[in-house]
């Protein structure tokens, strides 16, 4: 199949979240995975260590992203 370019017109409109792991050996704090996220428009990336692959980790990452851009 041919590769088709992806058109993203605004910052923070399209994201990808992905878990990397299992890390061997794990960290000294017991983290086995890394949750990464990238904004396709700005190529802004963020990573967070995780002990488990679960929805709580994803929710925490999304909260961190949102709180980075809240204007007081």
Image (cartoon, grey):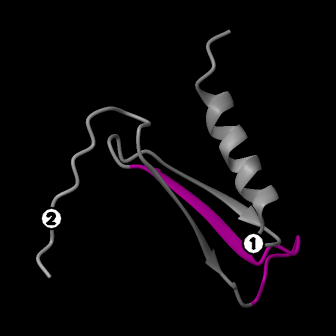
Separation of residues labelled 2 and 1 (CA atoms): 31 Å
Toward which corner of the image does residue 24 lie, by quadrant?
bottom right
The reply to whether the magenta stretch includes residue 29 is yes
Task: Return the residue at label 1.
Answer: 53
**Whole-percent x, y for residue 1 in the image:** 14, 82
Q: Which residues are magenta?
A: 25-39
Which of labels 2 and 1 is toward the front? 2
The reply to whether the magenta stretch includes residue 64 is no
Above or below — where is 43 with respect to 16?
above
Left or right for 47, reference 44: right
The C terminus lies in quadrant: top right
Task: Return the residue at label 2.
Answer: 4
Left or right for 70, reference 8: right
Residue drawn at point x = 66 percent, y = 68 percent: 34
Question: Furthest residue to the front?
Answer: 1
Toward which corner of the image does residue 48 lie, by quadrant?
bottom right
Question: Furthest residue to the bottom?
Answer: 24
């Amino acid at each position: 199949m041919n590769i088709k370019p992806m058109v993203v017109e605004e910052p923070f409109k399209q994201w990808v979240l992905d878990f990397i792991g299992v890390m061997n050996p794990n960290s000294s704090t017991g983290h086995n995975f890394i949750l990464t996220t990238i904004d396709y428009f700005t190529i802004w990336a963020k990573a967070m260590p995780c002990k488990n692959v679960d929805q709580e980790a994803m929710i925490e990452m999304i909260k961190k992203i949102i709180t980075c851009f809240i204007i007081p």
